[in-house]
Structures are given as structure tokens and as C-alpha cells.
Amino acid sequence: MKWTFEQLKTFKVVAELGTMTSAAEALGLTPGAVSQQMAALQAGLQHSIFARDGRRVTLTDAGVTLLRYTRVLLEDERRAAIALSGPQSEQRTVVSVGVFGSAAVSAIGPAIERLRTTSPNVVIQATEVDVEIMPQAILDYQIDIALGLSYQNAPQPPLRGVMVEVLHHEPFLMVLPPEARDIANNRGALVDYANATDWVLPPVETYFGRACRFACAEAGIEPKVQHTVTDTAVSIALAESGGGITLATPLMMGLRPTDSPVATLPGNSHRSIVAIARSSALQKASVSAVRDALIHAFSG
């Protein structure tokens, strides 16, 4: 089926006024031009839409159906024209943001609050996405912008056309069993203890698992992994129960506070929260506004 909005507009007037002549007068066209438009519209349809009734035209069942949807289409076109002709600041735009646990809790609320002031018609739609596939989700247009991760010793490879902007750095923290409280602030004793004690770490094939092991190596620690756990809350719970040492970050621990002793992992390893977006997407005022709101959320 092929039709144009001009044909549908003419069809609506013909259907409502009942004659080609009346429709032509209302539209400022000749009767011949109206007839040509209706003939072209009919040619693209499988069923007749008009039935002759003397000098008038009435609608068949197919015509009645087409008129119902024509009114919907023309009303949507009218609203779209009004929205696009007005100031851009008055257009409501939804921006999809890929998030993961700890960053979402820390940033999405403040970003939404910031947008209420700076861009009140831009709306964030948060979608949880695995950090390992976040860049590909951006490339596949599944999300507009994302909060992702980059680890100092295990950086993500660059992707053409994708912008990565650092928003926040945070150190690796060692969550220790209760027995290690007295050595948490003694770096030398801490490294020796860490080399002699069991560990709770994510699987080595995960992004965070690899980053943890690289960070431990920089600290001079070769972890003896006794428990392989992905979930942060479970890992910290195991450390609390004396099951071993685990790694976390301040944002991660915001989701799962603990009374166990905590020490900064020796060395300079850290992870970065990054904004990820297609370079072309940032040309949209809405996506750029969300990027600025996320930057502001981590600047405090």
C-alpha cells in the first residue's frame, strides 16, 4: 500500500463533504486534481474505498476503516509538526542510559535532578547492561549513552566512532576478615598477610576478575583464590565470615557497607567510571545534556 499525506488529507475532506466538487472548493483545488489524487490513492489499495451514490460519494467498509486510521495519522502529523516547529527546549526527549549497579545508584538520581534544572524536557531511561558488553550495546544503538568501566591495568580496547570520557576515579579496597583488623594500616604486614590468606575473587574470565588480578600483581600479591564469586554482596559477606580477602571500591561498598576492616590495596591501581557514547549521538542536544548531567553527578 502506497499513499501520501496529501492524498490522505484530500480523502478525509472528500469523505466528510461527500462530493469531489465540495472537497475541491474546501481545499482550493480543481475537481480534476481531487479526482486524480483519489484515483492514485485507490490504485494503491486492494479494496474499493468509494461507492457512487448519484453525484455523491459514500464510503465502503474499507473506506470507513481507512478514514478512521487517516484521522489518527493526520492528527499525529499535526502534533509532530507543532513539536518540531517550536523551541527545541520544549520538546520532550527520552535518552536511554546503560547502567550497572554501583554507578547507577551514585549517578542516576543526581543526574535526573540536574536535568530538571538544566533540561527539564530531557528524560533519562535507565537500562541495566553488563559492563563487558556496554560498548557494543552503544555501537548496536541499543542505548544512547552509558556509564561504563575502565581499569587502569586492564583497559577496554578503543572502538571506532565511540567516545569514552572519564567521570570518576576510585581506588581498589581490600575487605579483610575480622581477624586482620590490627594489620589493616600496616602495609608491609598487610601484603604478607594477603599472600598467605585465602581470597574471594570474581572469575578470571570476567572483566572485573582480570582487573582484580592485575591490581593484586601491582601490589605484590599473588592471591590464593579459594572462592570464585561474582556478586559483590556475597563476596563481602564471605570476607566478613572469615572466608578470605576480597576487593571492592568505595562505590561498590556504598551498595554493601561492612563492619569488616578495610584497607586500600597497595600500589596505584584504580578503576574509572566512564561515559560511553557514539560520537554522532553527542551531536544531539538531549544526549549531550545527559552527558553533562552525569559529569556533574560525579563532580561533587
Image (tube, rainbow, N blue to C red):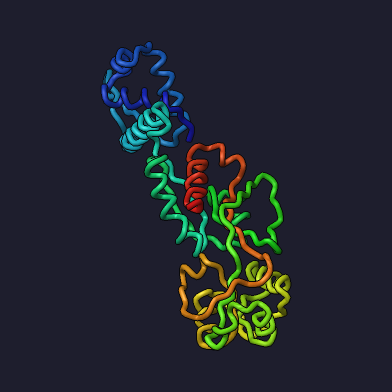
The residue drawn where x is 59% and y is 77% is 185
Q: From where the camera sits, is residue 62 visible?
A: no
The residue drawn where x is 60% and y is 58% is 272
- Count of residue discs: 0
Percent from the top left, x then y, of residue 134?
Answer: 59, 57
State the image quarter where residue 266 is shown.
bottom right
The residue drawn where x is 46% and y is 73% is 257
Percent from the top left, x then y, of residue 253?
Answer: 50, 70
Q: In this rendering, would 78 be left or right of 45?
A: left
Q: Is residue 216 above or below residue 103?
A: below
For this rendering, which residue is in front, 260 or 201?
260
Q: From where the camera sits, is residue 81 visible?
A: yes
The residue drawn where x is 41% and y is 44% is 115
Q: In this rendering, would 60 be left or right of 189?
A: left
For this rendering, which residue is in front, 231 or 221?
221
For this rendering, which residue is in front, 29 or 78?
78
Percent from the top left, x then y, of residue 219?
Answer: 70, 73
